[in-house]
Amino acid sequence: AVALRDGDGNAAEQMLGITIPDDFAAMNDVWTFMSGLLSDPANAGWTMNAIVCDGVIVGNAGFKGAPTADGEVEMGYSVLEAHRRRGIAVAAARLLLDRVTQDPSVTRVITTIRPDNAASIAVSASAGLTPAGDRIHERWGRQLVFAQDVSHPAVQH
């Protein structure tokens, strides 16, 4: 994230061992946000990751930081335009939901979406999240909130 934030795609490619598409590298807001998250050790494991299909980066998915004190975590996903409408975002969202069921500190997962982003709204619904109101983001304005309470598999003794 830091190398991409700083515009050093070559360093990022060397670290990852994979070619980074220009439109992925150009997601400056994501890399700046993720770099900030990485400065807090509590966020380790709760950031964005590249989505790779057949050795090609097709998008990113992950979390926007560690769960809050009350157990809420926000997930996000984005698929590069050339790879959309193939079910990749739904699959990524479902994997993220599976991941939170493994962490007992998570009680609720949310995602926030621009009201005009019909594709992302459909992804959230397909993954099983339901409308949960809206919020005003200081930079992006009104965002719809989709949420799912997290149940954890019973621990067997």
Image (cartoon, rainbow, N blue to C red):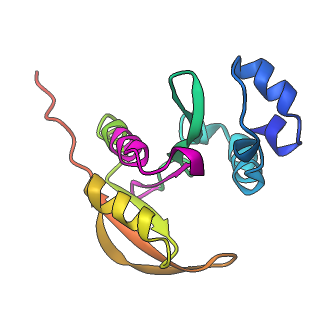
Horizontal and vertical percent position of residue 59: 57, 42
- In front: 31, or 18? 18
Residue found farthest to the left:
157
Residue range of the region highlighted in magenta in the rendering: 69-96
Horizontal and vertical percent position of residue 83: 52, 44
Can residue 80 be seen by looking at this rendering? no
Residue 53 vs 88, above or below: the answer is: above
Horizontal and vertical percent position of residue 39: 74, 42
The structure residue drawn at horizontal position 58% and vertical position 46%, both measured from the top left corner, is 82
Can residue 77 be seen by looking at this rendering? yes
Does residue 83 belong to the magenta stretch?
yes
Horizontal and vertical percent position of residue 52: 54, 29
Q: Is residue 84 left or right of residue 128?
A: right
Does residue 92 belong to the magenta stretch?
yes
Residue 8 vs 17, above or below: the answer is: below
Location of residue 44 (image quadrant):
top right
Q: Could you tell me which quadrant the N terminus lies in? A: top right
The structure residue drawn at horizontal position 48% and vertical position 79%, both measured from the top left corner, is 115
Residue 2 vs 145, above or below: the answer is: above
- In front: 90, or 109? 90
Q: Could you tell me which quadrant the C terminus lies in? A: top left
The structure residue drawn at horizontal position 26% and vertical position 51%, both measured from the top left corner, is 150
The structure residue drawn at horizontal position 51% and vertical position 22%, both measured from the top left corner, is 54
